[in-house]
Image: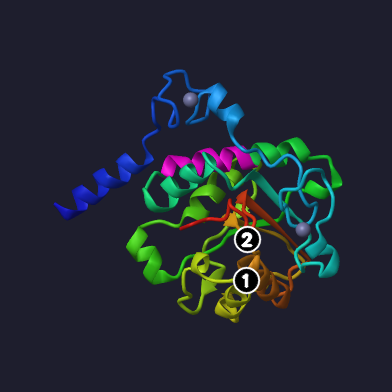
Amino acid sequence: MLKVNNWLKSARMRVWPQHCQLCGNGLLKANSVLCQPCLGDLPWNTTCCQVCALPLPQNAICGRCLRKPPSYHRTLATFSYQDPLSHIVHGLKYGQRLYYGRFLGNALAEMVAQGAGNDEFKIPDLILPVPLHQRRLNERGYNQALEIAKPVARLLSVAISDRVIVRNTETKEQSQLSALERRRNLKGAFFIRRSMKGLYVVIVDDVMTTGATVTELTRALIKAGARRIDVWVAARAALGGNNSPKT
Ligand SMILES: [Zn+2]
Ligand SMILES: [Zn+2]
């Protein structure tokens, strides 16, 4: 019986909604969970730092990246982390709305496809979603980063693996910590299971705030031999700004 219940729950989590998830309009845009006007109202991250995707008034390189260039090559963020997009991310992460993962993944893949041809957005060899610690994965039943990464990999025909990276230590929820604490919290948190020699790897996550997670992961992937690492996220938040994740 438990198995049937779990199956029903998991089927419900994946059923594509029939109405706009923000306004209830029945006319959904194709492949979207929103109607056209709500889709247009989302905080698309159109101008940002060309390295870390921090939202900026125009495309440039932010002061932080100029002072200390990150070890990843560049970041692509579909949205800036603000309302109402934050509700969508929250619904995916804590509300079991897995269709939001597909929606965010579709939007991310579309953004990459639009930039294809541009030298900066090459199609990678491998997509790696940021893993959850096993205990958190057991609690939640799914990894939101994997739910976003799956449609990206499928639409762009790129290999994906959720078995390459192991999350060693159980880290505290990053959102409760300062930038310095986040870095300390993650030291040595990831282990790479196989050689990444010569590979161009993309890390996929739901939200990037300080970049501490992807920085630590980049360090581990470079150690494993990766040639280039890019970061693709559904949303980019500014730490300390009024749009930083509260959860
Ligand atoms: Zn709507
Ligand atoms: Zn930057």
Viewer-proximal residue, 48 or 152?
Answer: 48
User: Could you tell whether 168 is left or right of 240 in the image?
Assistant: left
For mark 1, does the 10 Å Cα neighbourhood hold few (<14), some (14 to 19), or many (20 or more) residues? Answer: some
**Left or right placement of residue 16 versus residue 197 in this view:** left
> Could you say whether the residue bearing mark 1 is in a helix, strand or loop?
helix
Disc 2 secondary structure class: loop
Is residue 142 magenta-colored? Answer: no
Residue 242 position (above or below residue 177): above
Q: Where residue 31 sits: x, y (%)?
A: 52, 29
**Which residue is outermost to the left?**
1
Q: Residue at x 65, y 56 (%)?
A: 238
Report how far apart the C-alphas of labels 2 and 1 lie in the structure.
8 Å
The residue indicated by pointer 2 is: 239
Q: Residue at x 64, y 41 (%)?
A: 109
Q: Which residue is mark 1?
A: 179
Label whose residue precedes the other's in the sequence (2 or 1): 1
Which residue is outermost to the top? Answer: 27
Residue 40 rendering spot, x and y as whole percentages: 61, 27
- Range shown magenta: 98-108
Q: Main secondary structure of the magenta part?
A: helix
Question: Residue flagged by tag 1: what amino acid is it?
Answer: Ala
Circles 2 and 1 in contact, beta carbons < 8 Å: yes
The image shows residue 243, relative to residue 135, as above or below, that is above
Give the image location of residue 42, x and y in percent.
Answer: 59, 34
Label 2 Cα neighbours within 10 Å, binned few <14 / some 14-19 / many ≥20: some
Q: Nearer the viewer, residue 123 or 205?
A: 205
